[in-house]
Image: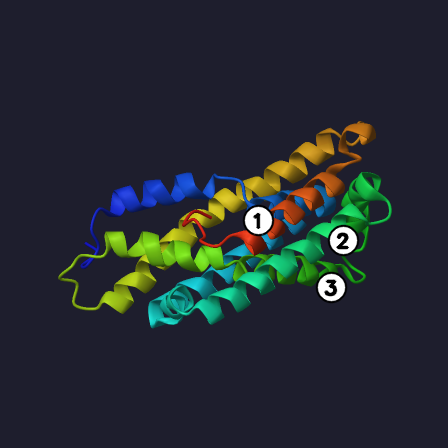
Amino acid sequence: MFSGIDHLGLFIAAGLLLNLTPGPDVLYIVRSGVRGGHRAGIVAALGIGAGCCVHIVAAAVGLGALIAASATTFMVLKWLGAAYLLYMGLGMVFARGGGTGALAGLAATRKSARAGGEVTLRRVFRQGFWTNTLNPKVALFFLAFVPQFIAHDASHKTATFLLLGLIFNVNALPVNLAWGLGAAWLAQRLQGLRGSLAWLDRAVGALFVYFGVRLATAEHLATST
């Protein structure tokens, strides 16, 4: 059915399992769902997916291979990604209001849906986009993972790569949406337990700082996202 693709079922299953693994993308989606409700969780998932599209196209046309082969290009992207994760993380850690603001934000975002709410959701999308786009691990992941499922005799390998990347991203979307919607649902149920959620922003921020430091100090990046 899909000419040029080997073991499509295995590709889909492996992709679903990989997308269930928590990382910077999942953490951002969960935080957005808790802070802004289901709309913010959905928009964050879409932003992550849009960033993933950039990596898919870049890897298909050879930019990903350039990143893997050029030490300078790789280092520039690595430091940009690390700096962005640190910027996001430190902003969460030192944000005024902390977790209480996260709970208040759940109601505030809904109240502002008519007056300026779109601007807030645009920011959620933009941050999700850059969280994924500036992560070189994603680029290297596609270079290492996708070619394993391209048949050696495929007549249009670039087109096959793009198709597999699209399939991966489409399969990832329901998982990411589930993270965002689940986080929003849980936040609604736990609104009375302010103390238990008071450190949400700081905890997620600390993890972003951890990911940023790990990215900045890694000489070789693993191929998992």
Of residues 106 and 95, which is closer to you in this image? 95
Numbered label tally? 3
Q: Amino acid at mark 3?
A: Val
The picture places residue 145, in percent across and down from the top left corner, at 33, 52
**Distance from label 1 to label 3 (Cα)?**
32 Å
Counting residues from the start of the chain, the first of labels 1 and 2 encountered is: 2
Give SS at disc 3: helix
* Residue at (75% x, 49% y) in the render: 92
Give SS at disc 2: helix
* Residue at (40% x, 50% y) in the render: 223
Instruction: Assess disc 3: are there few (<14), some (14-19) or many (≥20) residues with their C-alpha within 10 Å of its C-alpha.
Output: few
Which of pointers 2 and 3 indicates the residue nearer the eye? 2
Is 147 placed left or right of 25 in the picture? left
Which of pointers 1 and 2 indicates the residue nearer the eye? 1
Q: What residue is shown with label 3?
A: 119
Badges 2 and 3: C-beta atoms under 8 Å apart? no
The picture places residue 128, in percent across and down from the top left corner, at 60, 57
* Residue at (49% x, 59% y) in the render: 136
Residue 38 can be seen, yes or no: no
The picture places residue 157, in percent across and down from the top left corner, at 23, 66
Instruction: Assess disc 2: are there few (<14), some (14-19) or many (≥20) residues with their C-alpha within 10 Å of its C-alpha.
Output: some
Q: What residue is shown with label 1?
A: 214
Is 15 placed left or right of 160 in the picture? right
Give SS at disc 1: helix
Of residues 137 and 58, which is closer to you in this image? 137
**Distance from label 1 to label 2 (Cα)?**
18 Å
Of residues 31 and 93, which is closer to you in this image? 93
Is 1 placed left or right of 185 in the picture? left
The picture places residue 139, in percent across and down from the top left corner, at 43, 60
On residue 91, the disc is 2
